[in-house]
Image (cartoon, rainbow, N blue to C red):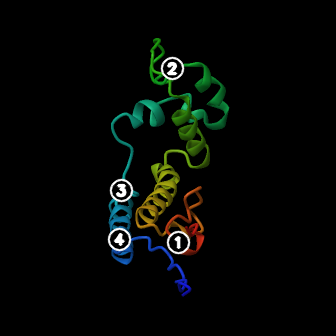
Amino acid sequence: MAKSIQPKSKPKSGPNRPANLTVGLWISVIGMLIYGNTLGHQYTLDDFSVIKDNFVTKKGLEGIGTILTTDYRYGYWISGGTLYRPLSLIMFAIEWSFAPDSPFVGQHFRFIPLTKKLHCSILNLADCSHLSPFCHSPNSYRGCGKHKKQR
């Protein structure tokens, strides 16, 4: 007597996938609202020494060469320092060249990538990253049954 061959069912990505997605999306929305609340804030703390009162950063794009060859606080005070963070200063200089003395522009430069990272992180945790055009990673399709290898 021949054995009947049963077709293999598609693997499931997890019993709580819709619940994970719902909870993840709520966490994402709450995170965006909390950070979005700060978009109207002014400069504070060390922003003065590296942006508002820093003559190198205030040169905008022209100051990038100096930023690459000096320490982090150069432009606020001239004495030598040991802290070297050119990328953040370059970003501040670019922001200053677009909109001098406007923290709003810089906050948007940081808000948009943060929102994308939060969006993709939540979808990855819920195994739903294949649902978004913004999330591209080698594991983007790991939660979708039709992309898994059948064994």
Q: Residue at x 33, y 36 (%)?
A: 45
Tell me the distance, in whole angstroms, between the alpha carbons under discs 2 and 1: 49 Å
Could you say which is closer to the camera, residue 91 or residue 119?
119
Q: Earlier in the sequence, mark 4 or mark 2?
A: 4
Circle 1: residue type: Cys
**Front label number (1 vs 3):** 1
The kind of residue on which mark 2 rests is: Asp
Q: Which residue is mark 1?
A: 144
Give the secondary structure at mark 2: loop
Q: Residue at x 58, y 75 (%)?
A: 146
Q: Give the CA separation, mark 3 to mark 2.
A: 29 Å
Q: Earlier in the sequence, mark 4 or mark 3?
A: 4
Circle 2 residue: 71
Label 1 or label 4, whichever comes before in sequence order: 4
* Amino acid type of the residue that numbered disc 4 sits on in the rendered structure: Asn
Q: Are marks 3 and 2 in contact (CB under 8 Å)?
A: no
